[in-house]
Image (cartoon, rainbow, N blue to C red):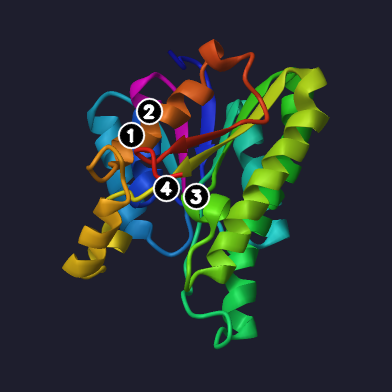
């Protein structure tokens, strides 16, 4: 259980992030539902959590902005007195072949997906060190492990998440802080709904378990890594992909 813990989940207004927020709240955490542009959807997630008896608050912040991320996290600490769990989930895609990819599309994805995670870790670390404890869980991807054609920017950002996770784990371990990554495979979300049936069927052929993953599959893994039971696990990448990787 996570009773008494304060958790920040970035990019939590939809998809995997919203499921993580609901799952952590169901286990007793007070959850900060971060969003950038989807205020209505973030409010829905908060309402769902509260209707189920949990505690949550929505906070708007573009995590790619170093100063904004700092203001958000300092505000959370000031209001709640601690920050025990950080889940870096915020991410975007700007797919395209590398030979045609624009500099803007490459920079945008790296800025949100990788620098956003760095920004939040950077601003959270001092409080977690002060508390002599904390859980950092970064959402990577199977694309960051094996690459994916048409996603050079996304794959690079998610591979970078793995390196960031391992470095943070080594730096923060002596203060009782763990840092781990979860690497989802093909997970059914609004983003994947846009794929053609042919593409979905092709993906299914590459999944040994012969089923697509759900957002709950990812949320359960995150909840475990955020719990006391995972206190001796750090610097690891947990693939939740049905065996794809």
Q: Is 9 rendered above or below residue 229?
A: below
Mark 3 falls on what kind of element? loop
Of the image marks 4 and 1, the number of the one nearer the N terminus: 4
Find out whether the residues at labels 3 and 2 contact each other: C-beta distance under 8 Å. Answer: no
Determine which of the numbered discs, if any, sits on residue 217 in the image.
1
Q: Quadrant of residue 103?
A: bottom right
Q: Residue 17: image x %, image y %?
A: 41, 45
Q: Is residue 199 magenta?
A: no
Q: Which residues are magenta?
A: 24-34
Residue at the spot of label 4: 12
**Is the residue marked by circle 4 packed among few (<14), some (14-19), or many (20+) residues within 10 Å?**
many
Question: How far separated are the C-alphas under marks 3 and 2?
Answer: 16 Å
Determine which of the numbered discs, if any, sits on residue 141 in the image.
3
Residue at 43% across, 29% down? 221
Residue at the spot of label 2: 220
**Is the residue marked by circle 3 packed among few (<14), some (14-19), or many (20+) residues within 10 Å?**
many
Question: How far separated are the C-alphas under marks 4 and 3?
Answer: 17 Å
Q: Residue 81: image x %, image y %?
A: 64, 25
């Amino acid at each position: 259980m996570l009773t008494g813990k304060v958790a920040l989940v970035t990019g939590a207004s939809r998809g995997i992030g919203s499921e993580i927020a609901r799952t952590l709240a169901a286990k007793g955490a007070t959850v900060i539902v971060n969003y950038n542009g989807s205020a209505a959807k973030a409010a829905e997630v908060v309402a769902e959590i509260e209707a189920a008896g949990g505690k949550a608050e929505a906070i708007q912040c573009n995590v790619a902005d170093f100063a904004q991320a700092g203001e958000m996290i300092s505000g959370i600490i000031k209001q709640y007195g601690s920050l025990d769990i950080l889940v870096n989930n915020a991410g975007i895609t700007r797919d395209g072949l590398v030979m045609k990819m624009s500099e803007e599309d490459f920079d945008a994805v790296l800025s949100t997906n990788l620098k956003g995670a760095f920004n939040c870790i950077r601003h959270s670390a001092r409080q977690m060190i002060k508390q002599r404890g904390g859980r950092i869980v970064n959402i990577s991807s199977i694309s960051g492990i094996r690459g994916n054609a048409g996603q050079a920017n996304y794959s690079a950002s998610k591979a970078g998440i793995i390196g960031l996770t391992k470095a943070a784990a080594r730096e923060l371990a002596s203060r009782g802080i763990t840092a781990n990554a979860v690497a989802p495979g093909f997970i059914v979300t609004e983003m994947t709904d846009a794929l053609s049936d042919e593409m979905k069927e092709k993906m299914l052929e590459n999944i040994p378990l012969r089923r697509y993953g759900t957002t709950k599959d990812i949320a359960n893994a995150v909840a475990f890594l955020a719990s006391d039971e995972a206190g001796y696990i750090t610097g690891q990448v947990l693939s939740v992909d049905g065996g794809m990787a």
